[in-house]
Image (tube, grey):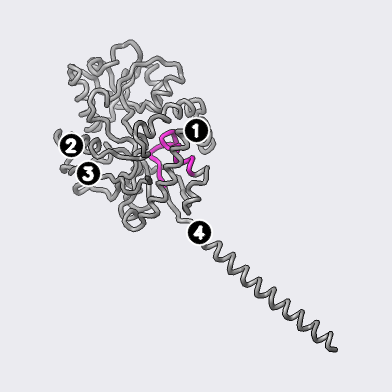
Amino acid sequence: MKKKILAVAMAFAMASGLAACGTETQETDSASADSEKKEEITFVLDWTPNTNHTGIYVAQEKGYFEEEGLDVEIAQPPEDGADALVASGKAQFGISFQDTMAPGVVGDSALPTTAVAAVVQHNTSGIISRKGEGMDTPKGLEGKKYATWDAPIEKAMLQNVVEQDGGDFSKVELIPSTVTDEVSALQSKSVDAIWIFYAWAGVATEVAGLETDYFAFKDINPVFDYYTPVIIANNTFLEEEPDTAKAFLRAVKKGYEYAIENPEEAADILCEASPELDEELVQASQEYLKDQYKAEVEQWGYIDPERWNAFYNWLNENGLSATEIPENTGFSNDYLPE
């Protein structure tokens, strides 16, 4: 009888222990689940995926965002662009450009966004044309058909470089741009000259075997070495969650630095995420950009206040800003990792 009572007691004790263990396991699992909850971030692109965005896709694929406790959605932009979506707070981060940011930096139409990182260090944009037709310098655009977006800053910049080269801007034939493929547009001779970002459209002409002439705006006038593209963030988000913003940029920095050191593998990651892209173009563009993401600076993403201010001061001086833009407006290096 004593043995039976002892056996029952032992069974009860074991059952109680297992129940307690089960409760403890459930609590541990619950705590683990809580600790694994990641902060949701939306990052909106400026256009379809391309090599300007590689570092973002690398950070996603390599788990750099996850390491920072972030769950990042990479979204396509709406018709009114990334700036409006980030300003609305529906996305915390996005891609923009210093020149297109200008109308929303100050004044009645100011947007609550801040540039927090430079994707590449220098302006790689310029004018491309068919080789040997005299448009290797800005003056050569006289009498030629230029595909324009009819934007005030665009036309003012073009006029500046043409006149600095001794040309007459009024002789440049401005054609409303319908260009979607620079290679086809140049080959068909529907236009003679196009404003491009060399890292993508310029490299595309090389891949296609099309011989071209090209000049970069920054090489004609250093004021035009502004920041394009940049990563922007919502101001309220920056104020309320600065640590999250820094965590995001730590992961992004690792993504771009991986792309610098491993351009071929980074290009593969971008192509996997966007299989519609031309793999040969992506590989060639990535090879070009690996030297542009950081260029001569040590800190990826750094925005030089002198260069940022120089461009906006030029806009002020030439009446291209409805409201004067004060120096050091619209950007911050405070969220960049060391």
Q: Amino acid at mark 4?
A: Lys
Q: Residue furthest right?
A: 1
Look at the image and tell me whether residue 275 can be seen.
no
| Quarter assignment of residue 94 | top left
- Residue 49 placed where, x, y %? 45, 36
- Specify which label sits upstream in the sequence, 1 or 4: 4
- Report which residue position mark 3 lands on: 328
- Report which residue position mark 4 lands on: 37
Position of residue 171 in the picture relative to residue 50 (left or right): left
- Specify which label sits upstream in the sequence, 2 or 1: 1
C-alpha separation, residue under disc 3 versus residue under disc 1: 34 Å
- Residue 180 placed where, x, y %? 39, 28
What is the number of the mark on residue 313? 2
- Residue 252 placed where, x, y %? 43, 43
- Report which residue position mark 1 lands on: 262
Above or below, 131 relative to 261: above
* Mark 3 vs mark 2: in front: 3
Is the C-beta separation of discs 3 and 2 under 8 Å?
A: no
Tell me the crowding category of disc 4: few under 14, some 14 to 19, or many 20 or more residues within 10 angstroms, Cα based. Answer: few
